[in-house]
């Protein structure tokens, strides 16, 4: 009866699919099969209407069969879902136009993960990798009416356990939270090509999803079809771009065709050829040049100009198929030059060495299909607005959605793209390796036209962790016999030193490959450490190693691709998962949303070094953010001061996949934490950076400008009430694209009460303020701060909503907010100068009226 119920429902829903009008693309028809799906538990009673793209967890939630997975400790109760098999099914009709096509393919953009696909009861596909696309010729089985498409998802956990049990030994997978999933120490994640973070991470819950996670299409065509276009950039500079359009064309017959490449941006025919297609796959190459091309530049350096091209296949002047593609023209190189200290690591864009300013990026949600276009827009806008020019798509997630890369292209955000391997070692049998190769081909082909992709990197931290060639690493090799070590090592070399670089060599030109992040050099025995003077570095001495924030200055790297510090999200976000009775950072609910075992201890420890540990819950959330901002700002300044030795700084991490305490700078609801405002300031094109050193202050100016500039630097020392104790203006010549050290500020420790004053530095170019900085001579906890009287007023000027803030004394870290979280300020968590009015732009929902219940909080708040 149960089954019958499902069939009736599916049949009713099928009406919807039959109404789906095909998108007409010349002689190609594309039908989206994303509606009228239903799901059903194989050995159980759960069933309902399904979303495609979607996941079983979100479908169960939408059908009110489970509670919100992110709320309180609900995650624990939902671990049964990944141990079940699930069927997804839809019914559809197709119109005669489609059915009569020479060729008809079913295309899955993503199946998560072990999926047997049946069309009209015939098994047409067995999928086993969520990172791949799947294409099947379905012409033999497709009919006009009543087609039944069924996808049987095997439990990824049951499959994983089978593979685990059959393996001669277990593999390390330090972030796989097997025990939370009821699997004891069976780390099954490594056997399945599926996003690593689904199995849990030190900032993420454990939701091992199943589902049709990307769209499904039926595509039919006559004669021939363009499967892919690649605009290969053989050579690009400002004078010329030598390009080849590489087309992969599928032809059903031998055909005489004219192939054209149209430059839609410049409105001309870039190239044209007459040729004969053979039946099957044909690679066609069209060479063309663009003189004085408009180049693609990263954020801060220029316009990220994009070109659009269209490839057309014609028979007797009639277009039989066409495909459009966008790309930006640029040369991007990873420059690794030997110097007296080691080997540099710097990106060169169109001949300019660019200091990479950015962050690491994780998937935006535990349930990937829930990520909306708005979410992508917000994350990329947050990167741009914080003066970033690079994001690293980290290897424990997914090869992101096309839209993510489109936004990076349009906004000049360079992408460091990891292949999806992180913090584990993986099997090396033929089936696994073939699967990895196919996954790499799919994704490299899908993403290779994006000018934003600056580097492909093999994996996250595996080289450092495994450390095969010498004692060290994370101690993993000690768990294995010599033979086992050799076998794990062989698998590693096969994937990261053969398969992945080979795929890139075959499919792409002009983008470099780096086998693992971090590494001290390309060769597998060039392991990174905090002492290495070549390659990239993940510096976790601060946080994991309990180093002081000041040590960011000691541990210099050629390129800092990871470092970070945690904080809690703001109260409005905490309220989305916790009740008032949970408002204690050690409560079960708060602990469930803090996945780093040492997280709370570390935050408290560092707070006690720099600030004070507050008793109050809300003040603790706020102070954790102030602390994180303090640390990360010190790190970024240290990295930029080390220019050109160091040429990049990517902190861990810009975003979250659920509401949680983590290293993120914007929380799951995209609220900026204090650190994101600090990052924005620290990544400004021109930065004043200062370092305390006994009785003097070192002063540096870092400039990303490509021309030297003449500036005036005003130095003022004031007490907390605003009395000026010292003032001087110096002229300073600032060198282009590097850091310049200015003469130190020397003071007398006997006469200056360094706990009661601060220094204000303002850098001007012809009276225009380029940068400013408030410098403290001591740690915040030692400052003799005075309780402020703060006045906040709402004003409007030229139709813009603003607030005016004033205080009688200096207020470090002033946070302005409202309980309902609707306030969003252009600047927040800032240091308010004494007796000086500050006007800040406000973005609030227009429909909101009243005074927004404006509140504030600072270091002395209770
Ligand atoms: C880095 C990352 C992640 C992790 C983070 C914080 O090494 O690569 O694996 O979440 O540290 O521990």
Image (spheres, rainbow, N blue to C red):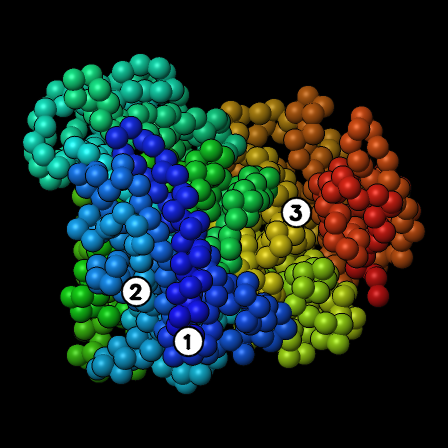
Q: In this view, does 408 lie to the left or right of 456?
A: right
Say above or below: 286 vs 631. Answer: above
Residue at the location (29% across, 20% down)? Answer: 262
Where residue 630 appears, x then y in whole percent? 65, 55
Question: What residue is disc 2 on?
Answer: 115
Q: Is mark 2 within 8 Å of ligand 1?
A: no
Question: What residue is disc 3 on?
Answer: 677
Question: What residue is disc 1 on?
Answer: 1
Q: How far apart are marks 1 and 3 (CA)?
A: 58 Å
Give yes or no for contact between labels 1 and 2 (Cβ–Cβ under 8 Å): no
Pick the quarter of the image with the N terminus.
bottom left
The mark that comes first in sequence, 1 or 3, is 1
The image quarter containing residue 435 is bottom left
Say above or below: 489 vs 517. Answer: below
Q: Which of marks 1 and 3 is in front?
A: 1
For the question of whether residue 171 can be seen, the reply is no
Pick the quarter of the image with the C terminus.
bottom right
Residue at the location (31% across, 54% down)? Answer: 146
Q: Nearer the viewer, mark 1 or mark 2?
A: 1
């Amino acid at each position: 009866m149960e089954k019958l119920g499902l069939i009736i429902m599916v049949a009713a829903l099928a009406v919807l699919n039959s109404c789906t009008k095909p998108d007409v693309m010349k002689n190609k028809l594309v039908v989206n099969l994303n509606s009228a799906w239903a799901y059903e538990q194989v050995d159980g009673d759960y069933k309902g209407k399904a979303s495609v793209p979607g996941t079983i967890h979100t479908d169960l939630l939408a059908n009110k069969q489970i509670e919100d997975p992110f709320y309180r400790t609900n995650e624990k109760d939902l671990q049964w879902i990944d141990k079940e098999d699930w069927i997804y099914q839809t019914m559809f009709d197709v119109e005669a136009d489609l059915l009569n096509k020479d060729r008809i393919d079913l295309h899955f953009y993503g199946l998560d993960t072990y999926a047997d696909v049946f069309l009209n009861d015939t098994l047409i596909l067995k999928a086993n990798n969520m990172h791949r696309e799947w294409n099947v010729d379905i012409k033999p089985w497709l009919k006009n009416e009543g087609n039944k498409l069924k996808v049987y998802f095997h439990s990824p956990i049951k499959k994983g356990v089978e593979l685990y049990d059959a393996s001669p030994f277990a593999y390390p997978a330090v972030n796989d939270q097997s025990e939370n999933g009821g699997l004891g120490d069976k780390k099954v994640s490594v056997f399945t090509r599926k996003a690593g973070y689904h199995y849990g991470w030190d900032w993420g819950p454990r939701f091992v999803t199943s589902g049709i996670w990307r769209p499904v299409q039926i595509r039919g065509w006559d004669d021939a079809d363009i499967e892919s276009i690649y605009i290969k950039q053989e050579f690009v500079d400002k004078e010329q771009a030598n390009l080849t359009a590489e087309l992969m064309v599928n032809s059903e017959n031998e055909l005489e065709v004219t192939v054209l490449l149209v430059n839609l941006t410049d409105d001309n025919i870039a190239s044209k050829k007459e040729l004969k297609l053979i039946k099957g796959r044909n690679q066609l190459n069209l060479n063309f040049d663009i003189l004085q091309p408009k180049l693609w530049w990263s954020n801060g350096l220029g316009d990220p100009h994009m070109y659009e091209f269209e490839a057309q296949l014609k028979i007797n002047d009639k277009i039989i198929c066409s495909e459009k593609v966008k790309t930006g023209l640029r040369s991007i190189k990873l420059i690794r030059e030997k110097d007296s200290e080691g080997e540099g690591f710097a990106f060169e864009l169109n001949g300019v060495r660019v200091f990479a300013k950015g962050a690491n990026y994780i998937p935006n949600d535990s349930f990937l299909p829930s990520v909306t276009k708005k979410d992508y827009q917000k994350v990329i806008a947050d990167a741009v607005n914080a003066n970033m020019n690079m994001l690293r798509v980290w290897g424990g997630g997914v090869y992101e959605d096309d839209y993510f890369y489109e936004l990076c292209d349009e906004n000049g955000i360079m992408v460091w793209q990891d292949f999806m391997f992180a913090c584990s070692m993986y099997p090396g049998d033929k089936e696994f390796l073939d699967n990895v190769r196919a996954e790499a081909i799919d994704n490299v082909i899908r993403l290779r036209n994006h000018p934003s992709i600056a580097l492909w990197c093999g994996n996250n931290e595996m080289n450092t962790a495994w450390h095969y060639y010498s004692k060290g690493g994370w101690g993993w090799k000690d768990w294995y016999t010599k033979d086992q070590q050799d076998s794990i090592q062989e698998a590693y070399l096969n994937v990261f030193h053969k398969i992945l670089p080979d795929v890139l060599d075959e499919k792409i030109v002009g983008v470099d490959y780096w086998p693992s992040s971090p590494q001290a050099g390309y060769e597998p025995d060039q392991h990174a450490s905090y002492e290495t003077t070549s390659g990239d570095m993940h510096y976790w001495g601060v946080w994991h190693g309990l180093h002081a924030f000041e040590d960011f200055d000691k541990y210099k790297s050629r390129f800092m691709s990871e470092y970070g510090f945690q904080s809690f999200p703001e109260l409005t976000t905490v309220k989305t998962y916790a009740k008032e009775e949970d408002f204690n950072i050690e409560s079960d609910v708060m602990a469930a949303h803090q996945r780093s075992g040492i997280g709370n201890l570390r935050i408290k420890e560092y707070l006690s070094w720099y600030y004070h540990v507050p008793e109050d819950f809300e003040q603790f959330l706020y102070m954790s953010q102030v602390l994180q901002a303090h640390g990360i700002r010190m790190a970024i300044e240290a990295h930029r001061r080390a220019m050109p030795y160091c040429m990049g700084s990517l902190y861990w991490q810009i975003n979250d996949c659920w509401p949680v305490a983590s290293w993120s700078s914007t929380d799951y609801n995209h609220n900026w934490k204090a650190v994101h405002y600090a990052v924005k300031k620290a990544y400004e094109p021109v930065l004043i950076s200062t370092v305390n050193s006994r009785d003097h202050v070192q002063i540096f100016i870092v400039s990303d400008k490509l021309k030297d500039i003449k500036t005036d630097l005003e130095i003022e020392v004031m007490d907390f009430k605003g009395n000026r104790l010292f003032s001087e203006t110096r002229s300073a010549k600032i060198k282009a694209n590097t850091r310049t050290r200015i003469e130190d500020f020397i003071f007398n420790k006997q006469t200056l009460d360094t706990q009661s004053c601060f220094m204000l530095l303002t850098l001007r170019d012809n009276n225009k303020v380029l940068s400013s900085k408030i410098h403290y001579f001591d740690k915040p906890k030692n400052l003799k701060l005075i309780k402020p009287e703060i006045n906040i007023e709402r004003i409007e000027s030229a139709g813009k909503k603003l607030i005016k803030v004033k205080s009688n004394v200096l207020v470090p870290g002033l946070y302005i907010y409202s309980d309902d979280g609707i306030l969003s300020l252009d600047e927040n968590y800032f240091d308010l100068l004494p007796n000086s009015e500050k006007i800040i732009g406000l973005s609030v929902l227009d429909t909101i009226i009243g005074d927004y219940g404006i509140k504030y909080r600072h270091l002395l708040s209770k």
